[in-house]
Amino acid sequence: MNNEKYNQLIDKAYQDYSLDYEKDNSIGLSLLVARMDGKSTYRKPDREMFEAMIRHDESFAKMRGVNINSREMTWEETVQWVMRYTDVELENLYIVEEAHKPTTPRKIVQIEYQNEKVEVYE
């Protein structure tokens, strides 16, 4: 599916973020982290933290030029996904059964960065 392209877009956005961080090293590009000794310090987020910030903080995503949208799949989209990505025969009973499995995605995530778009399922 499109997971590889999704990861490439996130990687590209993180690389650009890292370049800006190295250039500026500003507090606006850092995370405030509590230390064990009770003091706080700033540090650059790793790639996974960056992705979480992009996905959960709309203002941060917009600041970085990333447009990300997530929504629940409709029943029709779920059935289409089952028919496209599984080995289920075209019998209604099997399609419905597959659609209710926990491994069947429930969300569509769309990401756009620098005029590149990708859609993934979760």
Image: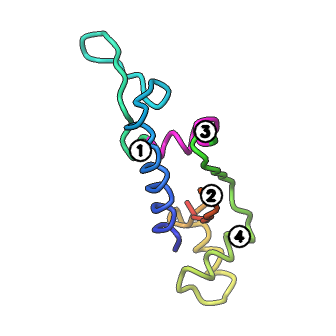
Mark whose residue sits in front, 4 or 1? 1
Q: Residue at x 44, y 27 (%)?
A: 26
Residue type pointed to by label 3: Met
Query: Which of the 4 quarters of the picture holds residue 22?
Result: top left
Q: CA distance from mark 2 to mark 3?
A: 13 Å
Kindly report the distance in space between the C-alpha atoms of the residues bearing marks 1 and 2. 20 Å
Picture coordinates of residue 108, whole percent (x, y) = 64, 60
Magenta part of the chain: 50-61
User: Residue 55: percent from the left, percent from the top?
Assistant: 56, 45
Residue 121: x, y in percent?
Answer: 57, 64
24 left or right, relative to 120: left
The residue identified by callout 4 is: 77
Q: Which mark is residue 19?
A: 1
Q: Nearer the viewer, residue 72 or 60?
A: 60
Kind of residue sitting beneath label 4: Glu
Q: Name the spot of residue 33 as percent of width and height, x first.
A: 37, 22
Q: Secondary structure at mark 3?
A: helix
Pointer 2 or 3: first along the chain:
3
Residue at disc 2, secondary structure: strand
**Residue annotated with mark 2:** 112
Residue drawn 61% across and 38% down?
A: 63
